[in-house]
Amino acid sequence: MARYCFQLHVRPERMAEYAERHRAVWPEMQAALRDTGWRNYSLFLREDGLLIGYVEADDLAAAQAAMAETEVNARWQAEMAQFFTGLDGRGPDEGFALLTEVFHLDDERASA
């Protein structure tokens, strides 16, 4: 399964509320993520608003497309968009920047 890492920027003045919302992610949103192929999904928030996400998926583009078809995702993204900067009119699920993986310990062990 492929690993993906991405970044977004949460408005510093909204970080506490953003974190609070993620302590109670709707069960139907969690189910939709699982059902559309998102695995081992985590979010990390730095004190200046930098948000790093990590997810594993067989195909991230397919998982994103499947999520985009769900009603619960449309509701969630509409509520979450207000927390971010730099989206240029896109939703958070469309506006994140993917990071390039340059090292993974288990990959190094497998090639040794």
Image (tube, rainbow, N blue to C red):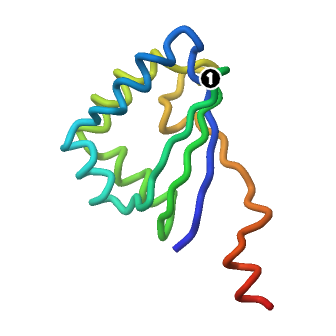
- For image coordinates 46% across by 17% down, the residue present is 16
In the visual, does 81 lie left or right of 104? left
Where is residue 96? Give x, y as percent: 60, 38
Residue found at the very far top of the displayed protein: 13
Quarter of the image for the C terminus: give it: bottom right
- For image coordinates 36% across by 44% down, the residue present is 68
The residue wearing badge 1 is: 49
Where is residue 34, by image quadrant?
Answer: bottom left
Where is residue 19? Give x, y as percent: 43, 26
User: Badge 1: how crowded within 10 Å, few (<14), some, or many (20+)?
Assistant: some
56 or 96, which lies in front? 56
Q: Relative to 33, does residue 77 appear above or below in the rendering?
A: above
- For image coordinates 62% across by 23% down, the residue present is 49
Q: Amino acid at mark 1?
A: Gly
Q: Relative to 62, does residue 110 appear above or below in the rendering?
A: below
Residue found at the very far left of the displayed protein: 28
Where is residue 27? Give x, y as percent: 19, 43
- For image coordinates 60% across by 57% down, the residue present is 4
Where is residue 5? Give x, y as percent: 62, 51
Residue found at the very far bottom of the displayed protein: 112
82 or 112, which lies in front? 112
54 or 82, which lies in front? 54
Q: Relative to 29, does residue 45 appear above or below in the rendering?
A: above
Dot 1 falls on a residue whose secondary structure is loop
Where is residue 104, by image quadrant?
Answer: bottom right
In the visual, does 7 lie left or right of 21? right
In the visual, does 27 lie left or right of 74? left
In the visual, does 69 lie left or right of 42? left
Q: How many marks?
A: 1
